Structure formats: structure tokens, C-alpha cells
Image (cartoon, rainbow, N blue to C red):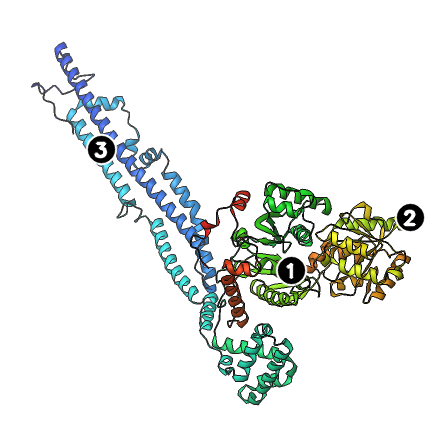
Amino acid sequence: MAKEIQSPPQSPSQTTGITFSSPSPSPPSLSMMLSSTNNAFSLLSKGWREVRDSADADLQLMRKRANSVKNLASTFDREIENFLNNSAMSAFPVAPSSSSSFSSEIGIMKKLEPKISEFRRVYSAPEISRKVMERWGPAKAKLGMDLSAIKKAIVSEMEMDELEMRRRRVDSDRFREFYAEREGEEGGFGDWKPIRSLKSRFKEFEKRSSLEILSGFKNNELVEKLKTSFQSLYKETDEAKDVPPLDVPELLACLVRQSEPFLDQIGVRKDLCDRVVENLYKCKSQHLWRLPSAQTSDLVGNDNNHVDDLDMRIASVLQSTGHHYDGGFWTDFLKPETPESKRHVAIVTTASLPWMTGTAVNPLFRAAYMAKSAKQSVTLVVPWLCESDQELVYPNNLTFSSPEEQESYIRKWLEERVGFKADFKISFYPGKFSKERRSIFPAGDTSQFIPSKDADIAILEEPEHLNWYHHGKRWTDKFNHVVGIVHTNYLEYIKREKNGALQAFFVNHVNNWVTRAYCDKVLRLSGATQDLPKSVICNVHGVNPKFLMIGEKIAEERSRGEQAFSKGAYFLGKMVWAKGYRELIDLMAKHKSDLGSFNLDVYGNGEDAVEVQRAAQKHDLNLNFLKGRDHADDALHKYKVFINPSISDVLCTATAEALAMGKFVVCADHPSNEFFRSFPNCLTYKTSEEFVNKVQEAMSKEPLPLTPEQMYNLSWEAATQRFMEYSDLDKILNDGDGGKRMRKSRSVPSFNEVIDGGLAFTHYVLTGNDFLRLCTGATPKTKDYDKQHCKDLKLVPPQAHKPVFGW
């Protein structure tokens, strides 16, 4: 409030302030006018300052109120949006009966949303203060002063002060009433009717939704199914209670059947075991009263299927007990599981190019054609020989200074023959050449050179050869599936040596031992091989595509009337007695007069070349010995007849190649030639007299051209397909688990696995002793690789892997 200003005493006729006219007839003096003017202007300036300060305070108060309204509106709008989002994205199931109510509530909120947004926009505008003042405080809308106000101030200072104070009271009361109506207890809009109604509606909606959500959760079908499934886990079926335990005849029959491989080792034939099992199972008929009626009728009506019935009985008993057994007594419980969807196949063989032998060439083609499939990645694992051994094995003094150099040679040789670039990996393991055995033996544990991440499927070419002196991890423990392919009839070769019968006896049992302990499946190329456990007979070899192309070329020449064959007969093979040279010389010498002027060209190199040629000269045979050549050499295309009297081969590759080129083949009626009998150009003989007749027939006729089906059967595509089928790889690679492997789960511990594990452990113990290794014919220092192997293959010394020495 303005202070009262004291002035000098004046006459009663005078008034305080400035007047433009006076009722007094006489004008005031100059000093009095100046004094009155100064007082008036002083009062005016002072009043102006008070008005300005009051207006500023009022404006600040209005700004604060406007900001409070704006913040409240923003907070309220965010709460509405959060509530809508939470309601729309609720994970709780709602009962079907409340779906319409829920939809209506959402609709109301969607209608209110734009109005709330508009409310926030309006009250958050900068000019809200001015709008409030225009509506509720018209006296404050104008802050400027006119002359009438100045006049009133001059006329009466006290009157001005009273009017100013009265006006401020009225304005403050009006503002108080305006905000009091709109402020809640917490500064909100609690007393405003639209907001109050909206808040009550929200409370009702929230209460009703919570009740409906709880009721919907209780009535949800998914919850009911979940309860039922949990109850079924612990519910024991009535059928399980009715299954009786196995009786004594059934237990004995199961034991005999599980022991068949072991009994076979001691001389008890499989057919005898089957009869024992059948007789024991027939004894079961005396105890059928123990079984339920349905099971009794099944057993009586299926006498011929006693093995299947026994399996069903064992399975039903085990299912009733709920017992499950994982693994075997000797097995590794943690087989590797490859996370990749693409399976990995490792092909391990005992020889490598440039040694032109079957175990070097055929695994190479197998790897190339298996790699063409996108279902698996392939690694070919071949032996690496030190330079001193390379000079003894590889032809034409060809040696390699590094594995990379030999790998380049192998790939170049392969691409020239298959016509495509094979996408597979080549890996090397340490090997040593044995002059006495004329074979390559692994040095150390071959399985360790295959990384654990790639240890999925293993193909062992010549599994008995690879595992004779194998001292390392069991193949079936490291790999998920192991397939062995038998290439060589070792028993036939051993019988030709000194004390061959005794050696063959031991080798026969050792081969059974190692193949059973280290393989899941064994493929025999023909019936000429030893009958091994877990084995089936199937030719999984094909011929080089180049020979099929030669055959097509010869067929075209013959179709044009040209002479395709201008030469007679020939024989090709490594010049050692076991490769059929003994049989050839005996047949030619016995029927020398019958064959007359028949001449035979012989191509081959080998350790027994001098002795073979000397024996031929002794009998004065018409044999022309020539240097060994590749069978695809141009010099051999014009021959019409290929003669192969060998009976030591398992499956002669040269015979298949000769048939692919469209030639006649004269061979013995032997299990090794069983696959070739279906070809019309294959002429087999059983006696020496038939040999003469077949030779004369072949020399006097022309061979028939091959049909497309016959050519396909000789190809590597068909061989790969047969291999995938008979090795069970088609089932393994096409399973529906997306490449994921699960550990095998069995109901009972298999007696076969116990025996196999025991054989593998015993073999590991025996091969760990250097003295026993040498006594059984092992190459010295092959238990581990040597320093030269470490240098060539960049390996860590074996002592780093096995710091503790012993078994």
C-alpha cells in the first residue's frame, strides 16, 4: 500500500493535488503551483512503481498456475497411454464372456484419447496466461494507464490509494475463486466434474478387468491340459500292472541269443544257437497260464516268430517297470554331438597315390563322389610316408617333400579322371612301410588326427588292417557311426606263406576281434572275403569314368562298321605270385597244346617279376612280358579279351575296367567275380578245360556293346548309392533331427556291447606292450610316430600327449 505523504498546512479552501480550474477568483502564486506539481509527479511515479510490481507478481503467479496445469495434463495423458498399451498387450487370458465388455472399454478409451490430447495442447500453450486474464480478470487485462487515472491520482492521493487497494482485493479474490474450483487436494483436477467422472470410470474399469482376467485364467483350456499332462506323468497304467516278469526259459533264451557272437568265437554255430532259443521258447508254452489271454493267443498263433515274440515280451516287461539303460559297460557315454546341420564323413585308408593300389584309388573316388552331395562334408585321411619309405613304395622314384605337395598331385590326378573338381579335404596321418608285409601300417593313434568336431561318421577302408596294431581311442566311442569296408582277402595271401595254415587260423580270429570291437557295420565287396561279424556283402566300388568313355568310343566305332579291336588277349596286374600269376602259368602249361598258337601279352611290375618270367621260360609258354601300364593307356584299347585267372582278389578292379571298355573277360567261377556274372561279356570257367573253351570262344566272337543300365551299374554313382544303402548312411543322413544327434538309449545293457567293449579293452592293453607287438609281427616303432613325422607333419611330440608312460 502507498504511504501517506505529509504536506505543509494549507488553507481549507485549497485541495491537495493539481487542478486545471479553481473556484477561487484569484489564481495561486507561482511557488505554490510548483510545489503542488512536484508533489503530484512524485506521487504519480511512486504509484506507477507499485502498480508495476503488483502486476509482475500477479503475472508470475499466473505462469506458475498455468505450468502446473500443463504438467498435470501431460502426466495424465501419459498415464492414459500406458494404461491403453498395458491393456492391449496383456498376456493373461480373458474369459470369452468378457470379450465384448473389454472391447467396449477399449473403445471408450480410444474416444477419450483425442480429447485429452486436445486438452493438454490448449493448456500448454504460451498464451494461457493472457486467456485466463481476459476471461477471469478483465481489469488486469490492461496494464496501461490513461489520463483519467492520472487525473484521479492528482485530485486525491488518499483516494487513489484506497481505490488501488480495493481493486487488488477484488482481483485476488477472483483469481482465488478460479483456481480453488479447479485444484484438487494434491494440486490436480479432483473437483472438476469431467475429470472426476473420468477417474471414477477408470476405477470401475480396472476393478472389472482384474476380476475377468482372474476368472479367464482359471477357466483357460491350456491350463487344464497342462494339469492333465502333469498328472499323466505320474499315472501308472493298468496294463503295466498286468505284465508278468520274465520266467526262466525266457531269460535263458535271451541270454543265448545275446551270446551268439561270443559263442561263434568258440566254435558254436549260429544255427545251433537259433535252435536252442527256439526250444527254450517252446518251453514257454507250458507257462502260458501266467500271461493275459490276449498275450496267450498271440504267442500260440505265432510259433514261427518266436524271436519277435521274445523281443515284444522283453520290451513289455521293461516298459512296465519303467527301467531305461543308457550305454554299455565299456562304452563312452559322451559321444560327440556335432552342432552343425551338415554331417561329416571321414574316410580313412591304408594307402595313397601315387601308389596305384586298390586301397589308394577306390577310397579317393569314394570321397570325390560322396562330396558331390550337399548332405555331408568329406575328409579323406591317407598315410604320410617319410622320404625313405616313399622311395620304396612310390613308382618311378617319385617323392614328396611336404604333404601339401602330395595333396596337389592327388587332386590333379583325380580331376583328370572324374572331370570335375571334388570339394573334400585331404588329411594325413603318420605311416610306415613294412617290407616283409608289403603294406603301410599306421604309426600311433590314427583317430587322433581327426578333430573331435569332425568325428561324426567314419569309413574305415580295410578295418582289420587299420586296427591290427591300433593303440588308441576306440573308433565307435569317438564316432557316432563306423563303417568298415573289406578290400583284401588276407587269409588267402597268408596261406601261401610258410606255416600259412597256422598263421591264417590266428589272423582269422584277430580279424573277427578287431572288426567287431571297432565297427558298427562291415561291408564285404564279395563272398571271397572272410565272414566277419556285423558284415553284409555288397560291391561298393565303381570304375573310373574314363573307362566308360573309352567303352562309348569303341561302341561308336563299331556302329560305324570300323574295326574296334585289332589285338588279341592280355593280362594286367602287379607281378607278384598272389595276383594270379601262379594260376595263369599252371593253366597255360597244362593246356599248351590245346591253346596252340594262342599268345598272351602280360603287363606288370613287381617283386616277383624275375621268378614269374623264369617260370614261363621254363615251360616255354607263349607269354610276352611287358612293362606295367595304366589300364587306360591307349596301347591297351585295341585288345579284345582280358584274361584274369586270379582267385585271391576280393573284387578285381581291372576286370570291371575291362568290362567298362566293352571287352571280353575270361575269369574263374569264384565268389570274387559274382558281381560280374550278370554282364554278357563276362565268361567264367570252373575247370581248366572250360578255361580253354572260354578263351577260344572269346577269340572267335565279338563282344556285345553295353546297355545304359549296365554302364550305370559299373559307375561310381551307382556304387555310391549302393554304399549309402547298405551302410545305413542314407537313413542316418536323412533323419529328421536336422543334424542333431542323440545318445542311444536302450532298455537293457546289451550283452553284445559288453563283449565288444571287453574285446576292445583287451586289444588296447595287448597293443600297448612293445614286446607283444614285435612278437605278433608289428613294424618296429609304430606305437607312436617318430621325430621325422613330427617334422614333416608339424606335429607335437607324442610325449606331450602321453606324459605318463605305461600301458
- The amino acid at mark 1 is Ile
Proximity of marks 2 and 1: CB atoms separated by less than 8 Å: no
Disc assigned to residue 562: 2
Place residue 806 in its image quadrant: bottom left
Place residue 569 in its image quadrant: bottom right
186 horizontally vs 120: left or right: left
Residue beneath label 1, please? 485
- The amino acid at mark 3 is Arg
Q: Position of residue 714 (x, y in %)?
A: 76, 56
**Mark nearer the viewer, 2 or 3:** 2
* Element carrying mark 3: helix
Instruction: Residue 551: tell me if it is visible.
Output: yes
Place residue 727 in its image quadrant: bottom right
In the image, 560 versus 311, the foreground residue is 560
Residue beneath label 3, please? 167
Tell which residue pokes out farthest to the top in this image.
30
**Cα distance in 3D space between marks 2 and 1:** 42 Å
* Element carrying mark 1: strand
Tell which residue pokes out farthest to the front in this image.
618
Q: Position of residue 269 (x, y in %)?
A: 63, 76
Instruction: Residue 682: tell me if it is visible.
Output: no
- The amino acid at mark 2 is Glu
72 horizontally vs 497: left or right: left
How many other residues sit within 10 Å of disc 3, few (<14), some (14-19) or many (≥20)?
Answer: some
**Earlier sequence position, callout 2 versus callout 3:** 3
Tell which residue pokes out farthest to the right in this image.
561
* Element carrying mark 2: loop
Q: Residue at x 39, y 42 (%)?
A: 119
In the image, 230 versus 117, the foreground residue is 230
**Cα distance in 3D space between marks 2 and 3:** 134 Å
Q: Is residue 491 above or below residue 196?
A: below
